[in-house]
Structure formats: C-alpha cells, structure tokens
Amino acid sequence: MYEIITSTQNPKIKNIQKLDKSAERKSQNLIIIEGEIELNLALSANIEIINVFFCKELIPEFKVNEIFETYKKNNVNYFNKIQFFEVSKPVFDKIAYRENSFGIVALARPIITTLNTLKLPKNPLLIVLESVEKPGNLGAILRTADAANVDAVIICDPQTDIFNPNAVRASIGCVFTKPVVACTSEEAIIFLKSKNINMYATALTASKPYDEISYKTPSAIILGTEATGLSKIWLENATQNIIIPMQGKIDSMNVSVATAIVIFEAIRQRK
C-alpha cells in the first residue's frame, strides 16, 4: 500500500514545484527525474532515489514494481528507504514537466563529478561546452555524448544547471550515462593541458576544416554558444581552431548539431 495524494496543495507536491528553481535543488540536494527511461538510466547509474510519485491512470502499479525489480535485488536495504506515493491525475499534471512522461516522477540525490574525481582512459575523447545556456541544447548534446560513447562532458561557466529538469528530460536520461563536470574555463584548460589532451576549438575564424584534423590521440572538442561562439581564452589556448565549412547563407548552426558533426568524425577516425 502506498500513501495516496489527491491534493495539489500537499506539501510534498508543492515542494516538487519549488524544485523547478536551481537554487532550491542545490539547497535541498535533490533533482527531479521524470519518465520511465530516465528513471531506469538513473537506477543503472546508482543514483540514490528518495521519493517516487506515480499515477495509476498513466502507469500501472506492476510497471512501477518492474522498474525497481533489479534494483530491489541489488540494493535491498537501500530500496526499503525509498518512499512511494500514488497521486491522482490532476496532482500528477501539476508535477509533470512534459506530456507523455509515462506517469512517474522521482526525486533523487545527484552524483557530482569534479575534475579531481574524473577518471579517464589512456586515449580519451571529450566534449567541452562553454557557457551553454539552453537546457534543450545541453540535453541534446548529452544524447550525442552517449551515442558516440565519449568519455566525459565538461561544462564550463554553465548558464544552466546540469540537472535542470528540462535538461534531464531533453537528454532522455543521458545525463546519467556519462560523467558530466561543471567548472570554469580556466580550470578546464589547466586540466586538459595537465593530461596532454589536445584541444580543438570550433570557431568561425578557424584556420582548418574539422575533417582535416586527426582526433586519434587524446582529444577534446570545444564548443561555444551559437550567439557569441567561444571566448578568447579558448581560442588562444586551443591546440588548433577548427571550422565546419558551410555552404549556405548563414555562418552558424545549432550547437548540438555542430557537436554531433565533429564528434562523429572523431569516432569515424578512431575506428
């Protein structure tokens, strides 16, 4: 039996709504995970789940149990600490960030990776983003990072929270499948140089097309915002500035698309 919540004024429901704010998420050390796929990926990454809210009209109880079945077997003591709540459809509509979220929302403790705790293989391939602003772009890039099986994503001077619910949603849970580090550009540059990782900075003023570079050695692909591109510190410290030649009338493309183009060229070469 689960506690049933039918009021949108319930304190637990109102608290979920408060977690829409980055400062509140950091204060409570909680993140929101919405959707079955996202929750499964979080569980696979050993994310600590605190509360689970589900709506029987959207997801049956047995399906909720199925999601946690393997988790229960591997973490029996920990699983017993999770609180489950059945919520009515109007209540779920208040806490859901999207349509088609499959009727389940969880609160969890984030795993924070730093440059000091980041473990890399001998020949790493990294994505580095500077001042990413839009959660949707961040989520899309994290999906690319997962698809390409890169070793980590470094977010420099972020303008959006890594665990923004919209970023988690846009990544379809891929925020949990690869190490994601937030730091300053200066810290990232010092780290990459200390590891002898080549820095390839995308820029309109670059001297070499991206597909004329070899990415077979330790490499980091650096990308900036669509509006302003990379800052001077990256352009001056890069091993090589690179460009994606364009044939149309505009000189920029969506940063998530640019990321995929260069990363999959690197993957092609490494094969």
Image (cartoon, grey):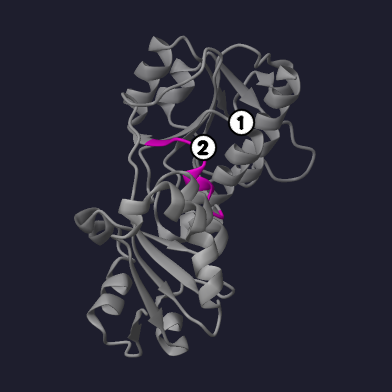
User: Outermost residue, left direction?
Assistant: 27
Relative to 69, 269 lies left or right: right
Q: Is residue 145 left or right of residue 15?
A: right
Q: Nearer the viewer, residue 8 or 69?
A: 69
Residue 140 image point, x, y percent: 58, 49
Residue type for callout 2: Gly
Q: Is-magenta flag for residue 162?
A: no
Q: Residue at x 67, y 30 (%)?
A: 262
Q: Quadrant of the N terminus?
A: bottom left
The residue depicted at 78 percent of the width and 43 percent of the height is: 248
Residue closer to the observer: 223 or 37: 37
Where are the magenta residues, as a range? Answer: 172-181
Report x, y in % for residue 126: 53, 27
Name the residue carrying label 2.
Answer: 229
Q: Looking at the image, is mark 1 or mark 2 earlier in the sequence? A: 1
In contact (CB < 8 Å): disc 1 and disc 2:
yes
Q: Percent position (x, y) of residue 164? A: 40, 56
Q: Which residue is mark 1?
A: 204
Image-based side of 164 in relation to 153, left or right? left
